[in-house]
Image (cartoon, rainbow, N blue to C red):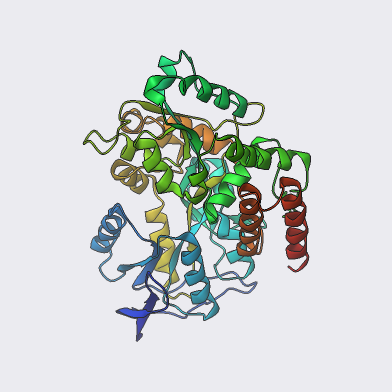
Amino acid sequence: MKSRTIRALQSGGAAFVGLAALAACGPAGATKAGGRPTFEGRGPITYVAGKDASGSVQEMLDRWNKLHPSEKVTFVQLPTDPDAQRQQMIQNAQTKSDAYTVLALDAVWTSEFAAHRWIDRLPEDRYPLSQMLKPIVETGKYRGGLYALPFSSDGGMLYYRTDLLKQARIAKPPATWAEMKADCAKVRKLPEARGMSCYAGQFQKYEGLTVNFAEAVNSAGGVVTDAKGTPHVDTPQAKRGLDFLVNSFKDGTIPKDAVTYQEEDGRRAFQTGKLIFLRNWPYAYPLMAKKDGSSKVADRFRTAPLPGLNGPGASSLGGHNLALSASAENKATAIDFMKFLSSQEIQRFTLSRAPGAPTYEALYKDPKLIKQYPYLPTLKQSILHAVPRPRVFRYGDVTAAIQQQVYAAMTGSTSSAQALKDLQQTLRQQAAGE
């Protein structure tokens, strides 16, 4: 037995704060012959994730801690910004610190963390993967092995103003970009829509821009990278996707200030009556449905699949998975905790308190949940047809390159063709450097 003080990076950067003195039992990083972890050791562990705005995370941990008083879990909250979360997790892994045990990884980080051996391969037979939506399960795999356990998913949806479409005698939400622009032209002729903009997504230079660009490319029949990580952005399909974004800024379909939008900016614009259509995640639904006066669109909107070039588009597949830090101790406890946290019971509990995208197919059919969150059937279809962002070894470099070139094209610093040509060259060089 030995004790140590777990030190964890806190929101805001480099300061380290001692969280708790934890008793560690069993050998850290013990492996079988062949390199597979044995998952030994029981005792206190940490759960590391972005800031919890809903408060539901601590409730879940309290449930576990009440049942496992000698194996308590401490919640280490990282910044809200996903790029900052990733950097702090990488820093912990590179120093081989045992401060972080179970990591809530963005679904797209699995390949990078697995390839660097920052996380352990998990025992698939310990988890009910067959009950989960297949595209979600695939986000946790790397080279045929399970390295991250599905915990929550996410899919983009099109939010639209039902009242305005009805007044403009539009029978159904648009399935294509051209239909959306035509619908906007009709709606904006209404006195009630004076001064409104047509559409917005997330276009600031951050991870959301990578998501929106990938969706545009996928929805035009292209891919950013193939299954092997080979880039394919200098193609006619990718250009049609990027041109949709660039031309929409030029013709006013997307308001100019949307180049600064993250998720919350778009949500506020929609719920204050500034937008007819909005691309966003399911978390926004109950916020915009509030009838306390904070939303001008309560009872006046619904969701639909994202539009595409020739028909319904393809969302980027979002969400978070649970991974086990390779340098952690008390891995037997961690494996059990991950099963608990990813269980259908806990996902039902979480969904009853905060919106989201569960991983279990059964929860999308639950009448009580559908009544509370009417977006669930649309969200299921979004996830089933979603395309993962590039599953590459050096994801951080890839997303930074995408953001730089796409932002330059949208703001007029370069043409779509040149941006994609430069991006293709950069992504090829990065792939060659792996």
Do we see residue 29 in this rendering? yes
Vertical relation: 140 (above or below) 329: above
- Tell me what residue is drawn at x 59 percent, y 34 percent: 251
> Where does residue 328 sit, x and y in percent of width and height?
46, 74
Q: In this view, does 136 lie to the left or right of 309?
A: left
> Where does residue 87 sit, x and y in percent of width and height?
51, 69
The front one of 118 and 431 is 431
Vertical relation: 322 (above or below) 254: below
> Where does residue 78 sit, x and y in percent of width and height?
39, 66
Q: Is residue 258 left or right of residue 431?
A: left
The C terminus: image quadrant: bottom right
Q: How many labels does the image show?
A: 0
The front one of 261 and 216 is 261
- Tell me what residue is drawn at x 46 percent, y 41 percent: 280
Q: In this view, does 217 lie to the left or right of 51?
A: right
The front one of 411 and 83 is 411
The N terminus: image quadrant: bottom left
Do we see residue 202 in this rendering? no
- Tell me what residue is drawn at x 39 percent, y 71 percent: 12
- Image quadrant assignment for residue 69: bottom left
